[in-house]
Amino acid sequence: MSAVDALVDAVRAALASAADPERAEPMRRYMKSAMPFHGVGSDALRRAVRPLIAAHPLPDRVSWESAVRRLYDEAGHREERYAAIQVAGHRLYHSHRDPDALDLWRHLIVTGAWWDLVDSVVGLVDETLRAHPDAVRPVVVAWASDDDLWVRRAAIISQLRAKDATDEDLLTAVVDANLEGSRFGSEFFIRKAIGWALRQYARTDPDWVRAFVAERGDRLSGLTRREALKHLRA
């Protein structure tokens, strides 16, 4: 059995063993998921999967990506996709989270196509962007005008953890590409993402966010403005 097979089989078995049928259907309904759930909560999932990743190390980048894609693309239950993202982001594979991983991140985003999966993958995008800004920044700018709504959302919230390392020009570019009147500018998940990105940066530079919001006026939706200014005094 290959290392990939061993890890994938172990993860699937552990999740099935931890299943809670009473929670499964409510979780599926809450997430509006066509794919069923096992009913394994996030903490229990981490406890189940983390030791398996350590116990079944993957020998190289190809094996790592193969394991991530198999758990994600062949998932029979949504928790397998959460586990795939755990494998992708595990410390053992830090060196693989470089610009060459961007195609994988985009695949996970497009295939997941819902906020729980997309926002989890964005943590990987954020890490890759901060580690390799010169190579990743142009890709994120392109993503902000992508034909896929969820790829655009990922671009908008790609710097949520950056704090004082936030690239203001990049933040401006990804937001301005998605204002009211743009292709997806009226979509809830885009308007909410813009507000979230600005709200997070307001914790670092509230004056910049106030000025940004004021300059764009009604090109920002009411929802976006409320989110952006949520923790700021008028």
Image: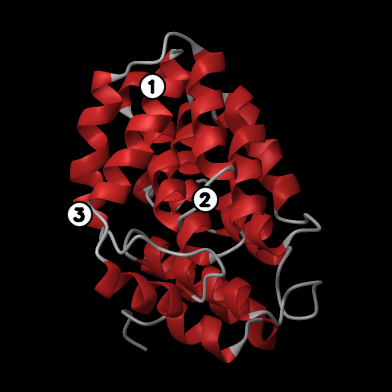
Instruction: Give the distance between the C-alpha atoms of the residues marked 1 and 2, in whole angstroms.
Output: 33 Å
Q: What residue sits 37% from the left and 40% below the top?
A: 12
Q: What residue sits 34% from the left and 70% below the top?
A: 24
Q: Which residue is disc 2 drawn over? A: 158
Q: Amino acid at mark 2?
A: Ser
Query: Label 2 neighbourhood size at 10 Å, few (<14), some (14-19), many (20+)?
Result: many
Q: What residue sits 70% from the left and 47% below the top?
A: 141
Q: Which residue is disc 1 drawn over? A: 6
Q: Amino acid at mark 3?
A: Asp
Element assignment for label 2 = loop
Indicate which disc, 1 or 2, sits on the residue closer to the N terminus.
1
Between 222 and 213, which is closer to the camera in this rendering?
Answer: 222
Decide: is 51 above or below 36. above
- State the image coordinates of residue 206 (x, y, percent, origin top left): 38, 68
Q: Which residue is disc 3 drawn over? A: 43
- State the image coordinates of residue 42 (x, y, percent, origin top left): 26, 57
Element assignment for label 3 = helix
Element assignment for label 1 = helix
